[in-house]
Image: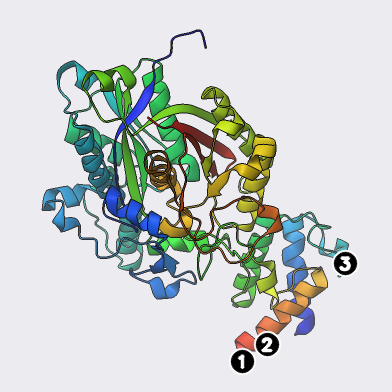
Amino acid sequence: MSDSIKDRVIAILAEQAMLEPGDISLDQSLEDLGIDSLGLVESIFAIEEAFDVSVPFNANAPTENRDFDISSVDAIIRAVQGLVATQAA
Amino acid sequence: MTRHMRRVVITGQGTINALGRNVPETLRAMREGRCGIGDLEFQDVERLSIRIGAQIKGYEAEASFNRQQIALYDRFTQFTLLAAREAIGQSGLSFSGELATRSGVVLGTSGGGMNTLDENYRTVYEDGKNRVHPFVVPKLMNNAAASHVSMEWNLKGPSFTVATACASSNHAMGQAMQMIRGGMADVMITGGSEAMLCFGGIKAWEGLRVMSRDGCRPFSANRNGMVQGEGAAVFVFEEYEHARARGAEILAEVVGFSMTSDAADIVMPSKQGASRAIVGAMRDAALNPEDVAYVNAHGTGTTANDKTECAAVADAFGHHADDLMISSTKSMHGHLIGGTGAVELLACIMALREGVIAPTIGYEEPDPECALDVVPNVARDVRVDAVLSNAFAFGGLNAVLALRAA
């Protein structure tokens, strides 16, 4: 289950970055991937649609987004795993 | 300046917005630093994650318009007509003969008849009906407000609508000013209107993740986004000699205007584009930076706008930026998108006529990236002679107006 979340998040980010999933590593940041602010909100939308969750993210208040860490690919995967676990419960 | 240029003055102003049903009520609220933002009330609001806005509460179309008019006038048109009645009434003008052909209307709006679209999409998609009201198209079109103003007041000169998102009104008023300057018209009814507070309007904005769930706090370190408002403001722009000849009361003079494009990003603002527009407006007005005492900011309350705007102001004004007052009245009336520059011009005229600088309310924590005098929370009594009004739109389209005291 966790692996599939990981793969699906990577697939979403890869599509946004126009890269192959295999070219994305866990320690990369969105900036490394060339994903800008519009790409980020589009990725969040794709994540919400894919996992049927609501992502608490406000582009104006990074400090309010402690429940959804976007600092790296790995952080995003863990945040989505957390959301799926709590919001599916 | 050696060439003779026709001068443009303002001889009437009108409005309806969350702060008031007319200009005196609105200016009183601005002086008191009152907030017009509250819980949104409309169908399906419970399906939104953003549920606050500066809505005109208790508004009843039936109080001002008859059944046939309501069938044709979207909410944004109604707001425009109400504001135009107040403005033209104050100017004392009536339009017939040659003056009618020398007078026009140029208004800004971004969403136009958004409520009409939303209601009729609901009818066909959600309710599954196969028939809509026959006037949907003339009701929702962006130029409906300008056209109805022209019809109500017999304005037969150049009329059109400008849609440049959050800069629509400033672009419209700049066009009005230039048309009078250039001799195309003697009187222009101008300003803008927006009525986007409906389910579809807010739902679309939610997606961008730039809206606040709890309030509009421009320039404050703890700001977390913009809050939408609705309403209209309309002005009578008149050629100076024409106004003087008939003994009209002159509220202010429109002395400069500048437009620039960032040519960079569809949503992120640019310091250079904004700064060039500010400098351009001062140059067009033959004002030096030291002459300008107050800037009505675009000040949306987003992280990106406020820090970029402050950097642009610092860039354009140099050392004078430290002596300048700059406030965002969106903290009170919300962001009226295509109508916002028009409502904000009311604060500029108040500064020039009454020597009252409208505050930036909701200001709680200084932000080192917005280290200007933002007139926090409380209005200030200062005599000023020249002011600017900034508007910077999505799409990188910037429009800045310069006004002088009459």
Q: Are marks 2 and 1 on the same chain?
A: yes
The residue positioned 55% from the left and 51% from the top of the image is B299
Q: Are marks 1 and 3 on the same chain?
A: yes
Q: Foreground residue, B3 or A45?
A: B3
Residue B40 as seen in the image, left or right of residue B57? right
The numbered mark 3 sits on a residue in which chain?
A: A
- Label 3: element kind: loop
Q: Are marks 2 and 3 in contact (CB under 8 Å)?
A: no
The residue positioned 60% from the left and 33% from the top of the image is B290
Task: Using the image, tell me which numbered label, if any, was put on residue A25.
Answer: 3
Identify the mark nearer the N-term, 1 or 3: 3
| Cα distance between the residues tagged 2 and 3 | 24 Å
Near mark 1 (Cα within 10 A), the count class, few <14, some 14-19 or many ≥20, is few
Query: Which amino acid does the dot numbered 1 rest on?
Result: Ala
Quadrant in which the C terminus of chain B is drawn: top left
In the displayed structure, would residue B141 be above or below residue B131? above
The residue positioned 39% from the left and 46% from the top of the image is B343
- Label 2: element kind: helix
Q: Foreground residue, B185 or A5?
A: B185
